[in-house]
Amino acid sequence: MDLRRQMLGAVLCAAAMTQAGGVPSEFGIDAPELARLGDLAVGVRTLFLVEPDQAEVLEFNAAKGAAPKRDRALTVDLWYPARPAKNAQRETYTGIFPSEPPAAPVSFSVPGLALRDAHTAGGNYPLVIVSHGYSMAPAAMTWLTENLASKGYVVAAIRHDDPPVTNRAQFAQPALRRPLDIAYVTATLQKLLATDRLIDPQRLALIGDSFGGYGVLTAAGATLDPASPLAKRIPGGMLLPYVRGGELRATLLVKSLRAVVAITPAGGGQLAAWGKEGLRDLTAPLLIIAGDRDRIEDYASGARAIFNSATGTQRYLLTFKGCGHAIGLNPVPDGMRDRLWDQDWFEDPVWRKERLNAISAHFITAFLDLYVKGDESRASYLNVPVADSSAGVWPKADDDFYDEFSPGTGGITVWKGFQRTHAVGLELLQAQPGQAQPGQAQP
């Protein structure tokens, strides 16, 4: 075991001593194979970016037919493979979420394994841009950001500074700004971090949770429908220059994109952001993760419809059966346990959150390694032998161990990378470009 791995192990042990269950990015013994942390220590730093001369959509003046313009400040949290220094301090993340009115917003903290401002380890890593959900924050997604950084990715999570989700009168701000923020931050970091040789700007992925899913799908190339209910909710036609056929549409698009992950994505359903045609314009491989009992973003007209409509690309739909909308965040922090509203930002009524996160991390790792890093060995984790995980079988043999990972071959149809009794309650569909209906890959 090399020095970096030893020091990472020491960090994890220390974290486990401070909180039962450890840090969100380290999963339990029932985690599928690819969910486990990588060999690299993790650093975190904070970047402050300014996009000049941006329209303030919430201050649109109908009489003047215009909105004032100001510089838009954006904070970005950056996780990366690191060289830990002796006595380096682990990060504790903090965030604030709206609570149920009239209660005040609630603050929380999350223990991390990342080391603040640690020196980078090597370079030319793929870049992953993460966009959180409406009124959320990167501090609530460290299960994924730290985990990916330990596996050789540089992960940049944008703090979008949304208005409170409880004030729907301000919906126009995230609806307009989300894809614009993603496009600006991506282009800026592709230049900035490539100059430092920390990333390879030609290897890029986008990950979005909930409203961030709407943002990354749009920035990835799904064209917005000018007649959509979403477009009509933005005053003064301020979205129209960016819709399908609009003169500024190209400014929403990121370059060198190799993969997109949308977790419980918004934008379908009643918003119908892309209409019947816009999702066909996606060309980067797509992984959608959703629950089929989502009460926030309807599964049938949301995740499933997005999967069916994105016929221009290879795509996958991982469904947690009986699961709702709260898939993309950490397990609930202590500070969010006093009210059910606050807890339900984080937790699902049925699925254990650590389990949800471990399964999602397993498939996101396989997907990004395959399409961003070009690791063809990961395809076998996505080409599952049966679409319904509960239908997998593992004929018992005398030399099998109870916690052994399935190879997914040789008559064993339990999904590869899962233990024999732990691949249940899931469905994984895939479809190739041009294919309107899901197909079943051969093992």
Image (cartoon, grey):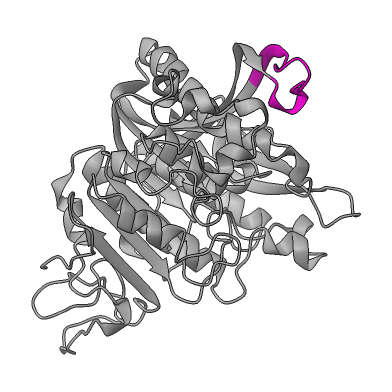
- 26 relative to 147, above or below: below
Residue 97, x across and y down, in percent: 75, 47
Residue 254, located in which quarter of the rendered image?
top left
> Residue visible at 64% across and 59% down?
346
> Residue visible at 22% across and 45% down?
370
Extreme left residue here?
A: 410
Left or right, 372 with reference to 337: left
Residue 85 seen from this side: no
Q: Which residues are magenta?
A: 56-73
- 350 relative to 136, above or below: below
Task: Assess whether residue 63 is covered by the magenta stretch.
Answer: yes
Residue 426, x across and y down, in percent: 37, 73
Left or right, 43 with reference to 106: left
Left or right, 71 with reference to 189: right
**Quadrant housing the C terminus:** bottom left
> Residue visible at 40% across and 31% down?
244
Residue 431, located in which quarter of the rendered image?
bottom left
- 195 relative to 376, above or below: above
Task: Assess whether residue 106 is covered by the magenta stretch.
Answer: no
**Quadrant housing the N terminus:** top left
Residue 35, x across and y down, in percent: 38, 57
Left or right, 281 with reference to 322: left
